[in-house]
Amino acid sequence: MEAHIARGRAVGVIRPPGSKSYTIRAVLCAALAEGHSTVQGALESDDSSAILSCVRGLGAGAREDVGLLGIDGLRGMTRSSELHCGESGATFRFLLAIAAAIPARTVVRCAPSLARRPVRPLLASLEELGALCELDSATGTVTVIGTTRRGGDVHLKGGVSSQFLSGLLLSGPLYPDGLDVHLDAPTVSQRYVAMTMHCMNAFGAKVEVTEGGRHYRVVPAKYRPTDYRVEADWSAAAPLLALGAIGGDVTVQGIGADSLQADVRALALLRSAGARLEPTDDGFRATGSGLREYEMYIDDAIDLLPIGCAVGAVARGRSVIRGIERARDKESDRVASMADGLDRCSVPVSVEKSRMLISGGSARGSRVSSFNDHRIAMAFGVLGSATGGMIVEDAGCVAKTYPGFWDDLRSLGVEVECRE
């Protein structure tokens, strides 16, 4: 599917879908809690479908109603299973850690797009715990024979992916004696780990952090069922606020500045570019005109790279985005993907090892590839509202986290035509 975007000023009030990160964590915690839980406001997307499919594969019950999930947790996990995580990297990595704590054979599969992304550091930690892990590098399929140990100490590299640590923490309550995770360095993307601990705590699990963030102890305690509400997704809110910032007037509801989500840093990014952001009773109102160059370090909120590039393309002057290395190992190489699209839109861009320099103010609409990456597609949808004449290829990939994105742009007054 292609999305054809005409130039238009976005005006209106919109509520983004539920947080993908919280949805995946809440569904998994609920599935591991013995009894019935509910998850309200959960994201409905390809990634959330993947985690629901996987917990059903483990033996949990999962019923979907409008705006509400009912999860019947496991009374014991000893069954062998085969799980397919689709394109959800978090689901894939979290389930590997869970599988290692199950005394059975679990085959964990993922889409080809995930097979190239790093996973060996996590497998090394799982093998230290006594699990047997066999990786098919060509397909990304991992066969896990779970450990019979009651818990103990495990070591992990801290500078690769926060999802490795989150997966181990989420598996911790399955070990009767708890789990101690020792990092060789503080983890990257610490906000995502904070989200994991926040969600675990809501389901009765407790994590203690010591040694300056190098030691995480999951205290022995089982998950307990609960009623959980998922907050709105800041990763989805960021492009909506950017629509207002580039010359529109958009109020985004359901978001707060106190969120643990990493992409709450969109507020700082847009303000540094000269956008006006006013808090409302239930969110933020974004307006702006004549955005200026900005500079930002983005490693701790790496999903903001695409929309940060789109803002830089509109802003006058040269914007600098630093800390870009980890963006190369996402659904696409987002550094290369954005550089390619910006070049097609006549935006001068220079890529170095750890930063991108974007000379804005002359962007024009063009045909660009999404590289089947939802965040790339949304970023060029936002840029297209400022330039007009934008055609985004493979635009249906937004279904991964925000299936209603193009409809929401239309509801705000941006002319979007989706063509098969």
Image (tube, helix red, strand yellow):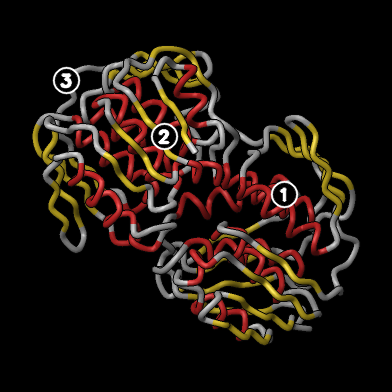
Dot 1 or dot 2: first in sequence order is: 2
Q: Is residue 191 above or below residue 292?
A: below
Percent of width and height locating residue 2: 42, 39
Disc 3, SS? loop
Dot 3 or dot 1: first in sequence order is: 1
Percent of width and height locating residue 114: 50, 65
* Label 3 – label 1 distance at C-alpha: 43 Å
Q: Amino acid at mark 1?
A: Val
The image quadrant of residue 271 is top left
Neighbours of disc 2 within 10 Å: few (<14), some (14-19), many (20+): many
Q: Amino acid at mark 2?
A: Ala
Label drawn at residue 290:
3
Residue 253 vs residue 177: left or right? left
Label drawn at residue 73:
none
Q: Is residue 89 above or below residue 380?
A: below
Q: Nearer the viewer, mark 1 or mark 2?
A: 2
* Label 3 – label 2 distance at C-alpha: 26 Å
The image quadrant of residue 358 is top left
Percent of width and height locating residue 297: 25, 48
Disc 1, SS? helix
Disc 2, SS? strand
Label drawn at residue 3:
2
Neighbours of disc 1 within 10 Å: few (<14), some (14-19), many (20+): many
Percent of width and height locating residue 239: 39, 32
Q: Amino acid at mark 3?
A: Gly
Instruction: Please name the residue shown 57% across and 39% down the image.
Output: 19
Residue 39 vs residue 24: left or right? right
Residue where numbered disc 1 is placed: 27
Instruction: Tell me if label 3 and label 1 are in contact, CB under 8 Å.
Output: no
Instruction: Please name the residue shown 36% across and 43% down the image.
Output: 304
